[in-house]
Amino acid sequence: MRHFLDFERPIAELESKVEELRHLSNAGDLNIADEVARLETKADRLLRQTYAKLSPWQKVLVARHPERPHARDYIDALVTDWTPLAGDRCFGEDRAILGGLGRFRGRSVVVLGQEKGSDTESRVRHNFGMAKPEGYRKARRLMELADRFGLPVIAFVDTAGAYPGVEAEARGQAEAIARSIEACLRLKVPMVAAIIGEGGSGGAIAIAAANSVVMLEHAVYSVISPEGCSSILWRSAENAQEAAEALKLTAQDLLKLGVIDAVVPEPLGGAHRQRGEAIAALGDALERALQPLLGLDGAALKAHRRNKYLAMGSKGL
Amino acid sequence: MSWLTNFVLPKIRAVVTPKREVPDNLWDKCPKCEQMLFHRELEQNLFVCHNCGHHMRLDPARRLKILFDDGQYTKIELPKTVQDPLKFRDRKRYSERLKEAQAKSGPGSDALVVAHGRIGGHPAVAAVFDFSFMGGSMGIAVGEGLIAAARLAVLQEAPLIVVPASGGARMQEGILSLMQMPRSVLAVEEVKEAGLPYIVVLTDPTTGGVSASFAMLGDVTLAEPGAVIGFAGQRVIEETIREKLPEGFQRSEYLLEHGMVDMVVHRKELHETLARLIDLLRRPHPSAEVVPLPQPAA
């Protein structure tokens, strides 16, 4: 059973009708086959229309879609010899951020990925993709490892944000994020980041201060969730849609602002409809982002990152 | 100023406006213990409550006066930046909110003031936040100000002292405010690469994107007593864990206990502590007095 979002209900109805008729048409009725074809075209057109003009809020919902490919899926499909490495060597292992060694298109790389989990059990195991200081300290440790061995770093960003909890604060959530950003910026190896779902605030930038940042067409990246923004600025949880508009959190707006470097088109109806296709497209985009960086030496890579961030924000929309 | 404005006008005003029994600014109330405090005494006490020791928030001018030797410093003009890059609007336009804040603190101002002067005789650069300017939130102007402060410190071969008082990122600048996190980290990096000390004085409050970037990267990190310092807001945490937060949670003393700051320093001792730290770091080999070798016993 596919999970449909609220705004997809008309499409869902058409598609379920098609399913029903298909069952009947096994009996071999020609009229039904015609009707199925007609409805399929209609559903397809509706899907195309809907996804061609998703509102920022609808994109937030698509970005959080439970069937959307997660970091784990990208790693499984794009990275060979995947060798996960665990722990921050200070306190513990945080499964909200996957990290390890592997090969991307034949090259050894260090991979970081925020993983939300895909069922209740794995969601709990990965803490819904919300990392604690251990996660950011592990990320930093692995970035330093990459630096030592001259390996490019690839980061998959997908988090609602860093975990807001008592222990996380006690162990220095702010410091852990700050050091992780610093580690990104100090790297003498290429770093590319991909915003695959939700780029949630400080929790996201901690592993996204990269040479090149690519972003899926319907992913979102923001300083605060629309819900959080709504409750602070509108003093009500009701205005999340307006907040989503105002925050300019879509890939299209972020490209205009120069915050990301490329938008990766998603299959019709979002990455969750054609997962394989979406994953392959992102792999190609990562390769395109990585290629020009591979020829640069350490100092040039660092300078490239520095200049990129220092130049950011000199123009508005 | 002329004889007319200095002398005549006040005289006329005194006649025209009825005398008030108590001037507005004679007494202040401590926001923590609610004790009534005599304004002049409070000022002499650096805005620390005599009764309960609560450290009140300081505006940039008062803060800078405390930081530098003899209260002497020179403010620098900060670079002009894009205002309202997203044309942001919530219940009110961001451009209007900015105008209102600037009406209070001066045209073109934002939540950061940068100045240079001397601390313990050493040249020093300080960047201090203005919490009254939109909660001290960090947008492009603040990020740009921090970069300017860092470059001034490098130019003067002086340590950089940053005093945050901020709720975090300036939401109204959206993703561009988030990007000030790496930008401010790069500012700090320039100071560190030049081999200069970077000292942070955490004051109430230091939270969100500000705490999770430059504020937690000090070579030495001081905190004023009782300041709220942390990443996530307390209400968000309470809603997530559905429990009451422990006593003193996210306060300076709590961070000291958890190893996140070097010292909690009373405001009265702040200048002296900074002077000593800077001297220790910047003058590692003071011309020592010659200690005579012990003479062998005859």
Image: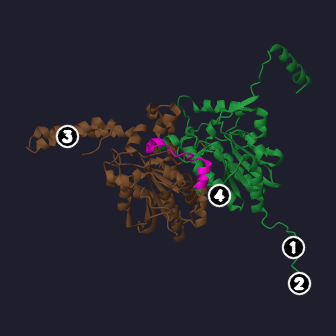
Chain colours: A brown, B green
Q: Amino acid at mark 1?
A: Val
For the residues labelled 3 and 2, the Cα–Cα distance comes to 109 Å
Return the residue at label 4: B189
The circle on residue A18 is 3
For the residues labelled 3 and 1, the Cα–Cα distance comes to 97 Å
For the residues labelled 3 and 4, the Cα–Cα distance comes to 60 Å
Return the residue at label 1: B291
Return the residue at label 2: B297
**Residues indicated by labels 1 and 2 sit on the same polypeptide chain:** yes
* Residue B240 within the magenta-colored segment of the rendering: yes
Percent across and percent down for residue A287 are: 44, 60
Percent across and percent down for residue A216 are: 42, 49
First in sequence: mark 4 vs mark 1: 4
Judge whether B172 appears above or below B232 on screen: above
Q: Nearer the viewer, mark 4 or mark 1?
A: 1
Does the CB distance between marks 1 and 2 fall below 8 Å? Answer: no
Percent across and percent down for residue B178 are: 55, 46
Percent across and percent down for residue A192 are: 49, 58
Does the CB distance between marks 3 and 4 fall below 8 Å? Answer: no
For the residues labelled 4 and 1, the Cα–Cα distance comes to 40 Å
* Residue A5 within the magenta-colored segment of the rendering: no
